[in-house]
Image (cartoon, grey):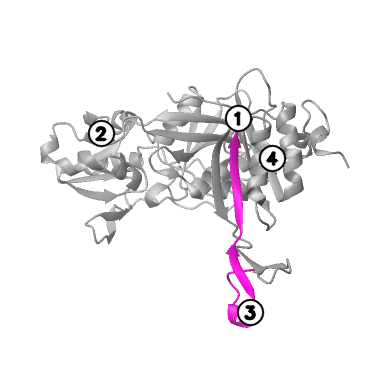
Amino acid sequence: MMNFASGMALGDASSLWSLIPKTPPPAVALKLESRGGVLGLPASPMTCSIEAEKPPNRTTELQPSVEQPDGNIVWRSNKDIAPFARPLSVSSKSAYPDDNKKVRISFKGLPGSHSEDAALAAYPNCESVPCNEFEDAFKAVELWIADKAVLPIENSSGGSIHRNYDLLLRHRLHIVGEVQITTNLCLLALPGVRAEQLKRVLSHPQALSLSDNALNRLGVVRENVDDTAGAAQYVALNNLRDAGVVAGARAAELYGLNILAEGIQDDLGNVTRYLVLAREPIIPRTDRPYRTSIVFTLDEGPGVLFKVLALFALRDINLTKIESRPQRNCPLRVVDDSNMGSAKYVSLSLSFGSIPLAGFERYFDYLFYIDFEASMAEPRAQLVLGHLQEHATFLRVLGCYPVDVAR
């Protein structure tokens, strides 16, 4: 068996990248089908599925589903939006891409969302593939509906998006780039409506949270929606003159709304970092700054995590992100507290009453996600991961990609 360093060597045909199985395009007979979209809205009739054709849903409208104790309302949608683009569902399928066409980028949300802004920043001439959920965007790439996916991974105020960390491990896509976007939240309303006429404001919960001070000054009721662009679309379609929207400037342009105020977020320097995912990794280079993302688990023992982090410090590699997530398949580690050194794993689905745990301590077992500033083409990065394998029970390189700066 080859050693790790030689396996990671740039250009080596037996490198780690070449060991990853290539996924061929699915050979299936496809039929057109409409699927549910963001907020429960009907999807585009041009999405495909192996199931029989079904008629689109045209008979619904957005209604409040749950009123929260703080006065906020969570919406569910049921409105026909035939004039607008509709997102894909997980079960939609397509033939493999044509290299002569624009690169197709999947993202969560409707056209005009911040995720689409990030996709356009990375690929200005891309073809947007809006999706229902984050996992739908992964599936769109795996099923060759899209060439790449763009998904948010962290925000400078809201922190990490844990759902997407879990999806990175569940799926076999590779990080091939990143996009950092400075947030510019706007207050939108129908033409002719003034800010003082607004009684409520609709948006994604995080957008409402990031613009807390401005909304407090307005004294409006906040209503949660799945997507900022979806909120703009709903207000426009229903001609709601008492409702405003917190969204981006492109949403105002796409859905015919006026911008009443720009930059209403509490932190004017707020930045969201997005990852670009693809079916195949890119070849790392050394001609510009690169970032590498990995995920691993460790054996139980005193100072094990410290020893791993020291590997990077000893080779002058800067860590830019450390994130821990409980393991879903084996969330608990049961450790013998009698210094015998034995350990076992317990599933949360098991009843502790049926397992003799006297003399044992229970700990959560974690996955560690780390981003560091080095290219896998550099020997120091290869050496670090080679030594990390000595401590790790599991190690996976999620991607090595050029560093982006906020724009």
Residue under numbered circle 3: 358
- Asked if the residues shown at circle 2 and circle 3 are in contact, with their CB atoms under 8 angstroms apart, the answer is no
**Can you give x and y, in whole percent of width and height, for residue 309 in the image?**
63, 42
Quick one: label 1 or label 3, which is nearer the N terminus?
3
* The image quarter in which residue 86 lies: top left
Q: Residues within 10 Å of mark 2 (few under 14, many from 20)?
A: many
Q: Nearer the viewer, mark 1 or mark 3?
A: 3
Label 1, label 3: how many angstroms apart (C-alpha)?
Answer: 45 Å
Quick one: label 4 or label 3, which is nearer the N terminus?
4
Residue under numbered circle 2: 264
Residue under numbered circle 4: 25
Q: Which residues are magenta?
A: 346-373
Residue under numbered circle 1: 373
Q: For residue 117: magenta?
A: no
Label 1, label 4: how many angstroms apart (C-alpha)?
Answer: 34 Å
Q: Amino acid at mark 1?
A: Glu
The furthest residue to the right: 1
Q: Nearer the viewer, mark 1 or mark 2?
A: 1
Label 4, label 3: how many angstroms apart (C-alpha)?
Answer: 53 Å
Residue at the image point whose x is 26% and y is 55% from the top: 73
